[in-house]
Image (spheres, grey):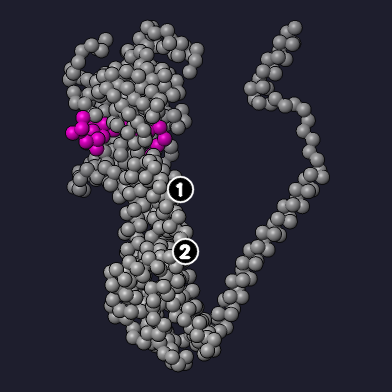
Amino acid sequence: MRQDTNNLPDVVYDVRGLNLWYGETHALKDVNLQILKNHVTAIIGPSGCGKSTFIKTLNRMIENVPGVRTSGEILYHGRDIFDKDLRVEELRTKVGMVFQKPNPFPKSIYENVLYGPKIHGIKNKQLLMEILETSLKASALWDEVKDRLDDNAYGLSGGQQQRLCIARCLAVQPDIILMDEPTSALDPIATSRIEELINRLKKDYTIAIVTHSMQQAARISDRTAYFLLGELVEYDYTERIFSNPRDQRTEDYITGRFG
Amino acid sequence: MEFEAQLLQQLEIEKDREIINRRPVRIDPARIRRRVWLNNLLQRVFSLSTAFAIAVLAILFYQIISQSIGWLDWQFLSSNLSIFPEKAGIWGAIVGSIGLILIVIPVTIVLGVSTAIYLEEYATEGRLRDFIRINLSNLASVPSVIFGLLGLSLFGRILHLGSSILAGGLTLSLMVLPIIVVSAQEAIRAVPGFLRDGSYAMGASKWTTIWKVVLPIALPGILTGSILSVSRAIGETAPLVVLGIPALIMRVPTSVMDDFTALPIQIYYWTLDSVLTREYANLASATIVVLLLVLFLMNSIAIIIRNKFQKSY
């Protein structure tokens, strides 16, 4: 366990005493957790346990929901993301996010991938083309779309759209990618392609993934966090969570007794 | 016993498939006959309603067009006003109406779209925003005469713009502004939230997201609403009458500070005076044809824009 060592260089996120309320509802209760560099961290738990809320707090997207209040700190490379001087826009260029439903823009494949680089001021055509190619190759989409980069992204299949969203995310070279149930809207084949992709991306990126599928967590993650009713019940190496959980509630969940 | 167990299991499976009600469902043929009869009746009622609307429109068109025949010609379009019906033309009114459009379009679109963006994207949810929203909808249904009175006191008297094109254009702008705001708000609200999230998650600011993602998608809706509102402004008479547009203006306006007349105003005064001079009715009809053509053109543009840019998600 590395829980007690603080601010080592390999800690990307250090969440300390995080609480979150939606109006009166206490959705996250005193969550403490560290996300480690180049690890895939899976966040599992039954519906309504706060796992999506938690991951959206990491890039402060949760603040778009009206009536949200938080307390506690989330240190991103040692810096509190709730700090008044920190600009969320800057944080989000380092912390990418892939959503549950593929959400490409109604623009061309080219425009989708280069959305981030362009809004952040990159104009050099050659550099843009380079980013386009590397991002699409990294998201295993290049071979399928290289001849139709000007086509509308809505002509792609669901799985391709999700990989396009991953490419869009990679184009600004984030440090960590947050994925909120990225395969829940996809068929099994598209899902396994995304899982392969996550396995490959792990070398260069840190990934935190919310999933409703325990098999998926077991297949792709290094560490697993189990949330229940807004509480972080257990957080450990994935093998240990699935073979020898310490908490009875975790065991009940992974053995399928509820959830 | 084993058979019974099997049967129970089978029942369980069927229950899972939601085949619970195994009693035969009887359907009354008389009821079906009644339903079909009702359907046929309603179909006739609906088609009659449509026919009624078309008939009224046809009669209107017939009357107007037959009255305008022989009057609507190049001389009519290009001449200035005159008290002699055979010499009178609407060139001045056309210029006046174009002047109004040129003021109404930039003023309402800039102010209206900005307001809609503020209310939909920036304003925090709460009582104040709801209050403004409700009042905008209310303003959209305020009679146009009231806006004429507002324009008269604000632009005519306080700002000393008199009954100039500028005063008229600003008054009409006030009148259609709520409509444009409401329709632009609807267009902006129709942009799915997950597209905004996609942009925010890339580190885009609110304005970047609005400019790059929201507005391009909402633009057809905004333009359609705007064009329809502007065409309503062009056809409006009451506010201009209240502003005190003179009944007879011989000079074609050359600046926005000049007094002017507009197409609907001309229709109004000629119709009023047709009691004395019967030919004025023909002049009014010819003007109506011109105004209808302009409105028809603008609405067609709105439809073309809507069809061309319509997208689904």
Q: Find residue A64 and report its horizontal and vertical position in percent.
A: 34, 36
Q: Find residue A194 and report its horizontal and vertical position in percent.
A: 38, 29
How many other residues sit within 10 Å of disc 2, few (<14), some (14-19) or many (≥20)? few
Q: Which residue in the structure is indicated by mark 2?
A: B143
Q: Is residue A99 above or below residue B162?
A: above
Residue type, numbered disc 2: Pro
Q: Nearer the viewer, residue A108 or B85?
A: B85
Disc number placed over residue B312 in the picture, else none: 1
Mark 2 or 1 closer to N-term? Answer: 2
- Chain letter for mark 2, please: B
Please tell me whether residue B156 belongs to the stretch shown in magenta: no
> Is B67 left, or right, of A112 in this rendering?
right
> Is B207 left, or right, of B30 in this rendering?
left
Disc number placed over residue B246 in the picture, else none: none
Name the residue at 27% across, 22% down: A72
Locate residue B74: give its quadrant. bottom left
Q: Nearer the viewer, residue A232 or B281?
A: B281
Q: Secondary structure at mark 2?
A: loop
Q: Find residue B145 and report its horizontal and vertical position in percent.
A: 44, 68
Name the residue at 36% across, 87% down: B250
Q: Is residue B99 above or below residue B28?
A: below
Q: Secondary structure at mark 1?
A: loop
Locate residue B263: give its quadrant. bottom left
